[in-house]
Amino acid sequence: MTAAFAPSTFDPATLQGNILRGYRLGRVRYLILEVGGQAEDRARARRFLAAAAEGGSAEVPAITRESSGKWAGGARPDTCFNIGLTAEGLRALGVADQHLATFPAEFTDGMTKRAMKLGDFDDSASAHWPAPFDQPRRVHIIASVYADDEGRIDEVQRKIADAFTVLGHRDGRNLAEDKVFFGYRDSISQPRFAEVQDPERSQDSEPVDPLGTVLLGFPNRFEGVLFSVPSPDVLGRCGSFNAFRILAQDAAGFEDYLDAAATRLLAHPLVDQVLEPGGEARIGRGLDRFGALREIVAAQMCGRWRNGVPYETSADAQLPDPPEAAVSLTNFDYSRTSACPAGSHLRRCNPRGGPIVQRIANYTRRLVRRGMSYGPDFDPATRDRSERGLLGNFIGANLGAQFEAVMCDWLNLGLQDPDVTGSNDPLIGANRVETSWFDLRLRDGGSIRLREIPRFVTTRGGAYTFLPSLPAIRYLAGLTG
Amino acid sequence: MTDAPGWLDRFVDSLPERGWFQFLSRYVVVPYWAWRDPKPKLPGGPRPAAQPGENLQCMMNLIMPLKDPSPVGRAKAALAIAQNVDAIFDGLDNVGTVHTARFLLLDGNLCMISVYDGDFSNYIRDFIVTIGSVFDEIMDLVVGGEELKPTAQNVDKFIAWVHAHDLFQAPDFPTDLFTLQDEAKGVGPGGPPHELRSLPRALILQLHANPNISLGGGYRAYPGFSAAQVRAKFGVGW
């Protein structure tokens, strides 16, 4: 046990490159892979991993590594390739049962067995997931290939298909202006690490996160607590866990709900406490009162206006004066008198330093989020209902203490604040029309309870994966049997 | 067909009261069925529910077998709790999601009975983060405890251990037992249906695997409110 907690040294070259920061490339393809059942299949997969960890070859793409600071000179790769393995995948490559037993239960259980904690019931139940996630035991590896050019992605896929059975794939892309289909600007706040240089984030006021937030073997935000490093040490150390999720977003349903809410508010006696008469111009250019009320509902549900401006610091205006460019998107905190509703999506996912019931939990459940959208563009004017959504990665050192803790207690129970306990996250929660509610905050501190909020985000697939370090990939490549 | 039971039904119904059958079932029938149709030990604690309000005021019945169940050993356990009771109550206060908690000495077991809100793993993790050192002292006294020390560096292992030592809560709807047993065996919802008349056998076999259980999830005199909601309502801060 003592050896497992010897302090790790931070060597970026031993890490996969998609953990500590994103690549900022325009497209991604997730390839869902199976290691064949024959000895020769395992041997082929191991040869592939060995070559990929050693910088690749003509037939094998290289695993993209973290390289803090090195890409500043313009040497950024145009194609990035990384892997995550499920517990079944580790088993298929030959990891012994005694070693698998040292991984946390939520990982070895797999995502489908944690359904109730994650809100994966009703239409989100794994029984409704399309292939290949309808057969979770066959999902061994989720490989991600990032590039701006689809041709490069195809090229990498051809190489991967020589070594693994490709059960399926999902393509994602960045939407214009970093938006998601609900119309919000996304990916603004992420954990940051002292060890990773990111000039764009140097002015953020949120506390810097310890490496143990995402990497096994490093101290984390819990004082004196260390997450166990799975055995053998070379496999577990400097690894990370990822909740990969395919999340369908009902953009049309969301816009419809904003219409319904605004219609109700227009007839409400307290409507002037939602929006002062004549305040429409600060909400959006060319908006009438109905349109402005829609945006206020959207902003309070999220905790940000759709252009990214935080509701906390600009409660009365999406277009603050001075203009939004002068408003920090990241530097604010919550308090007992916050303008931002406690039930909003932002405050549920990351309550920052604000008051929460679990007093010791502030900043302990931070997650790295990397997502891209899938499906056709959405036009709020026509509101077609094609499936579209987010291919999300929620990365942390402990799925139970971070991803699941946020999903069950904060997003789908509201335990952190007695005023929202018993309600789900209005945007991404497991809402049911019969019981859902969200308290819209009024200018005088009062509230109007919005009800009949449908579920806007449905799970369509996913898996818990382990993101091994480069030495761990070499270890896997060297297994026998 | 008449509703009145025939002679065979009456005979079968009377079997549990007959001494020879009690002997036979104890030493032959139950061990035989436990071999033929083994039921995995089911994990403890409440099962998460879809409706948020159902995940409040959850019950934990943690049964920790003492290494030394003699009066001296039990006195040591009583002392360990008494010496740390302030720290334990401070810890529970800081976790913020606990309604009540108490310790019992029951035969050779130290028991912690508590009512808490939300996810079980979060409750135990936050508790260890707050007062892990106190739990290390308790782990010295219970069977298997030394492998979990220091608890702050074995959080996942400790959570799994508590989960295994928390009493299984029999479902409030008796036939749900079939589903739980199937899940524990890895049988999906599409498996063969169970005959209602096999429910008593399923229960007996489960009691063979889990000798101590909680009969249902417990009674609540009012709908689920969180500890913080109660505190907020009474103006005592949260």
Image (cartoon, coloured by chain):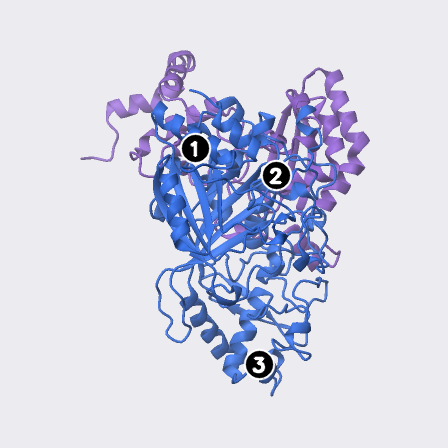
Please provide percent x and percent y for residue B126: 67, 41
Which of A124 and A10 lies nearest the eye of the viewer? Answer: A10
Q: Amino acid at mark 2?
A: Ala
**In the displayed structure image, the side of residue B10 where residue A94 appears, left or right:** right
Counting residues from the N terminus, which is met first, the one under dot 2 or under dot 1?
2
Residue B150, by quadrant, is top right
Residue at image x 31%, y 35%? B191
**In the displayed structure image, the side of residue A38 where residue A243 appears, left or right:** right
Chain where mark 3 sits: A
Residue at image x 56%, y 56%? A422
Residue to which mark 1 is pinned: A48
Q: Residues within 10 Å of mark 3 (few under 14, many from 20)?
A: some
Residue at image x 73%, y 34%? B132
Chain where mark 2 sits: A
Q: Amino acid at mark 3?
A: Val
Residue to which mark 2 is pinned: A13
Which element type, helix, strand or loop, lies under badge 3? Answer: helix
Please provide percent x and percent y for residue A432: 45, 59
Q: Is residue A267 visible?
A: no
